[in-house]
Amino acid sequence: MATEPQTAAGQRPVEALAAKLRRRQVVGSRETALETALVLRQVVSKARFQNINQLVEIIRSVGQKLIEAQPKEHTVGNTVRKLLHHIREEYNNASKGKATASVNEFSIANFVLQGQPRRQIAALKGESTLVLKEDDLDDPDSFARTLKPVVMEAIQDILDELETVYDNIGKSAKDHIHSDEIILTIGRSKTVETYLKSAAHYHKFTVIVAESGPSYGGHDMARSLSSSGISTFLVPDSSIYALMSRVSKVILGAMLFLQMVASTAARAHSTPVMVCAGQFKLTPLWNLYHEYGALDFADPSSVLGFEEGELVDKVDVVNPYYDYVRPDLVNVYVTNDGDHPPPSMYRLVKESYDDEDNEF
């Protein structure tokens, strides 16, 4: 634990973001990840610590407060976990002169990491020039003074990744979407929208957009795609199953209402399902309860208004923000770090986070 509590100035941005998350003033994976990274930058810049344990404890406490404020926004915890992973990696390189785990050590985790070794090999080759002095009585601030620039750089890397995530995902679009194909998507997803527009530079294809009631984000999606010269048709959600036999592939964002319906219908017709999402959405948490445990709910009045009178008192109305999609319904994940089949998700988790940060 840190030798002295964080200052009120350091706590203010944390409390402010926690309040916004509780009130749903900040909604969406990318938005919450960006806000979390910005708050972490403010906290680290004002924090005082003399060793790695104190720094980790400060960052974990921030993550714990934000997650408690809105446990359904998993990218808050993912952002904190990623920063902690970067910090431990730099600390281990500086203190031991090698990566956290030797690639020669035999273990399942290291065996998985060798499947895509570019990050680990880069860490091994690049010897750290940091000289860290923990708990220095003569100069208590020397550890923080040396490590803070590295931490701030890691936070900036996270911010840069979030800023460029759409463009990086769109780079592979021309390889997955071909001429004369019929693509089905649901509602509005900025990631999918950018992906389809990137593919339109190389191929001519048709997009069917399900309107995704009751939010009807599909209307904005269809309007945006059509304005970019893409042949687009807007259909009601009830038409998904009937149209699926004509669809070449289904492309979904990571959080979309009615994803389960589309994915199940696609499986019945043997239609490939692609999920486009930034790697920052990848979480080590498992859904331990049931397949609807991943749901988050919006205001039910948009489904059944209070003006319905007696009917409101007789029914329970749920309006989920998004649905849980089982991994066996997805064929490929397209991220800003490349394309991945579902079995490779375990390796990506091991590359991005440390096991001790799975729970705060």
Image (cartoon, helix red, strand yellow):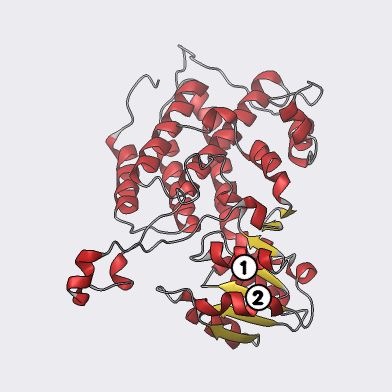
Left/right placement of residue 131 relative to residue 341 reads left
Q: Which residue is mark 2?
A: 244
Residue at (55% x, 84% y) in the render: 234
- Mark 1 or mark 2, earlier in chain: 2
Whole-Å distance between the Cαs marked 1 and 2? 7 Å
Give the farthest residue toward the top: 137
Specify the farthest residue to the left: 309
Q: Image quadrant of residue 43? A: top left
Q: Position of residue 58 (x, y in %)?
A: 42, 30
Q: Secondary structure at mark 1?
A: helix
State the residue at coordinates (64%, 27%).
130
- Residue 284 placed where, x, y %? 57, 39
Q: Which residue is mark 1?
A: 265
In screen coordinates, is 186 left or right of 1?
right
User: Residue shown at 31%/66% (left/top)?
Assistant: 300
In this rendering, position of residue 178 left or right of residue 288:
right
- Quarter containing the N terminus: top left
Residue type beneath disc 1: Ala
Going by the numbered disc 2, the residue's amino acid type is Met
Between 266 and 79, the residue placed more toward the observer is 266
Instruction: Please say if 298 is above or below 201.
Output: above
Residue 115: assigned label:
none
Which element carries disc 2, helix, strand or loop? helix
Task: Give residue 9's quadrant in the image.
Answer: top left
Picture layout, residue 60 above or below residue 296 = above
**Residue density around tag 2, few if under 14, some if 14–19, many if 20 or more, within 10 Å:** many
Residue at the front extreme, as displayed:
314
User: Residues at badges 1 and 2 in contact (C-beta under 8 Å)?
Assistant: yes
Q: Quadrant of the C terminus?
A: top left
Residue 290 x/y as whole percent: 48, 45
At 49% from the left and 59% from the top, the residue drawn is: 323
